[in-house]
Each structure stands twice: as structure tokens, then as C-alpha cells.
Image (cartoon, helix red, strand yellow):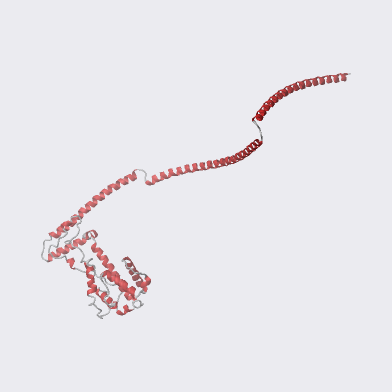
Amino acid sequence: SNVRHPPPSMASRSSLAGPRPSLGGLGAASANRQSVSGRASMASKRQSIMGTAEDARRSRGMSLGGRRSSVMPSGGRKVEDPRPIRDKAYMSKSIRKLIVYLSEHGYDRSISSQILTSPTTKDFLSIISFLLASIDPNFKFLGKFEDEIPAVLKLISYPTTVGRSALTAIGNPTSWPQLLAALSWLTDLLKYAEIVAEKEADDSFDNEDGHKMFVDYLTRAYALFLAGEDDTSALEDEVAFVFNSKNTQLRQEMESLRTSNVELDKQLQHLTGGETPLQKAESANRDLRADSAKFEAHIQQLQEHRAKLNDKLQAEEAERAAKASELASVTSEIETHKAVIAKQELTPADVARMHAERSHLEGELAKLRAHKEALSAQQWDQEVAVSKGVDRIHAKVAQANECSARL
């Protein structure tokens, strides 16, 4: 942006004489110490538009509320805005910047580029009220906003003027670029104030290596010199105390770093003394791969064995089914015989008689078998004798034939 911003505030900048936490934990020595000359630091007399962090917030209500009734547009020479406020690219950039700021700072209404392209009066008043409330939390419009907004902008040193006519037609393409530029300037102002407050809240010694502190020392010493006071030993003691505290802190940090360095060296030796984690991982990977191959082979064997067991089980199931069928048949036959036996009317005497007859018949059968064997032996002897007689006859016939042939 080409609009000049106010310089950063130095009112909240802490001097060496003011209360500050001790760097070495010995804050009581200088917590309530005042300037040697009894006068406030020169830096405490300087003020900016935004003021100090807390005091300015309390006083902004006065700056925006109490005085705005007397700061009305005077109708002086109109200052031309050097920014390209009607350029589409510049307007788009301003809209994006405004959306980001409102989103990051808790704006509780809907906001988008579409809304900011042609806003309603309600949207504009809500946004500018939110921005002005960031300067003065108690800010409220007391009268017509068309009259108060130009006065407030002039009060906070807005470099150009916003006409009342632009505020009567806010969404008009002719009026909106001028109002959007004002909102963009307010956003830049608030962001700049935040940066200044953050920088002033930071510890000067840590952020700028004591440069700002030394400048403050020179400023105060020069003020004493101009006042005719040549003794700056108190200021020098303060500077020495701060540097000694910082040196103590740095020594402690160095000792802590040495201890950490020793521990890291031990860890490094432990890590580099044996196998590296990669080597251990590779060795473990090889072992796991070998185990995996063994398990896969074993799984293959188990699968083959399971297939054989399944075949054997199927054969056993088929045999069991056949045995079951045979058992059923035998059982049926037994039941049939039992039924037949059950139908027979037999007495114990009949049974005894039948056993006797069976014994007699078995005896007769044995005799007949013996007689049969005897007859078989006799038949064999007779057959042998007949065979021998036939052989003698054949011999006689052959002899007779031979005699006949000789005759």
C-alpha cells in the first residue's frame, strides 16, 4: 500500500530502570528500581496512534468516542488517494486481505468475496464496526453513520477523505472502491499495530542481542549528561547486572549442551559400535525369509497329508456304509429267523429229543463216512488189480499177435 502508516509506538518499550523480570532469577534487585535522576525515561514520553498495549485500549474509547463529535469534516481541500483503488486486481487483493483478517480475528458473521464485491449497508457497518472495535472495544455509533464514519477516519489520521455521498450508496460500483480502500487501510493499521505490540512485548536482549538495551542505556546516559549529571555508575551497574545474568544463563545452557553432547556421543558409539540398524534388519529379514520358506514347505507337506487323509476318510466312509448295509441285512435275517423260531411250538422234551436225534444222526453220519472211506479204499485196490489184469492181458495179446505174425 502507498498510504503512509504511523510510526511504531515506543511508549510501551521497557527501560532498564522500569520493572522487568530478572534474567537470572534475581528480579528483586531491580524490580522496583527507578531512574537515577528521578525522571521518567525519555522513551516513556513517546506515544503512537495505537498507544501502549493496555493503556491505549482503555484510552481508545476516548479517542474515538469522546472527541469525534468535535472532529467533523471541515470541507477543506480534498486529498487524492494515490492508491489504484478502482483497479480490479487491487480490489481483489484488498478483499482477500480483509477476509483473511476477519477470519483470523473471530469475525462472527458470514464473509466471502461475493459479499465484499457488492456489500449491503448492514454488511459494511458490521465490518467497519468490528474493525473500529479492535481499536476501541467500547466503540458504538452514536448518531448517523454517514456523519460519524468520516469523523472517525479523520480522527485516526486516514490520509484521504470519505464523502458522505459514498456512504449513502455503499454497494454502488462508484462508491464501493473508496470504502473498500478505507477498510483495507484499517486492516493494515490493525495488523501493523499487532506487529508493533508483539515486537515491543518481546525481550529486547534476546531478540536483538542487547542492541536496543544498549541504545536505551545511551539515551538515558545522554539525558543525565544534558541534565548535568556525570555519574552513570548506576546505569552501568544495571547493564552489568543484565549481562552477568545473561552470561550465567548462557553458561548453564552451555553446560546443558555439553551434557546433551556427551549423551549423544554415547548413543552414537552404541549405534556405530556393532551392527547398524540396517544390517540388523537385513539379517532379521534373511532369517524371516528362511523361516518363511520352511513354513511354506511344511504347509505344502501338511496339505498333501491332509489330501491323503481325506481320500482315506472317504474310503473308510464307503467301507463303513457297506458294513452298515451288511449289518442291516444280517440283522434282518436274524429277525426273520427269530420270527420263524417264535412261530414253532416246541417243548423241552422235543428239544431233547431233537438233540438226541442229532447226536444219533451225527454218529450214523460218522459211521457212514468211515464205511465210505473203507469202500473207497477197497474200490481203489480193486481198480489197481483190474489195471494190472488189463496190463497182463495187453501183454498176452501182444505176445499172441507176435506169434501169429511169425506163423
Determine if residue 160 is in view.
no
Quarter of the N terminus within the rendering? bottom left
Hey, which quadrant is residue 137 in on the image? bottom left
Q: Is residue 69 left or right of residue 338?
A: left
Whether residue 265 is situated above or below residue 50 in the rendered picture: above
For image coordinates 15% across by 64% down, the residue present is 220
Depth check: give the residue in front, 324 or 302: 324
The x and y percentages for residue 198 are 25, 63
Quarter of the C terminus within the rendering? top right
Whether residue 354 is situated above or below residue 94 in the rendered picture: above
For image coordinates 34% across by 45% down, the residue present is 272
Which residue is most to the bottom?
75
The x and y percentages for residue 214 are 19, 61
Determine if residue 167 is in view.
yes
Depth check: give the residue in front, 85 or 137: 137
Hey, which quadrant is residue 269 in on the image? top left
Whether residue 336 is situated above or below residue 260 in the rendered picture: above
The x and y percentages for residue 261 are 28, 49
Task: Please tell me how many numbered marks the rendered image carries.
Answer: 0
The x and y percentages for residue 323 are 60, 39
Depth check: give the residue in front, 320 or 202: 320
Hey, which quadrant is residue 177 in on the image? bottom left
Q: Is residue 223 left or right of residue 275?
A: left
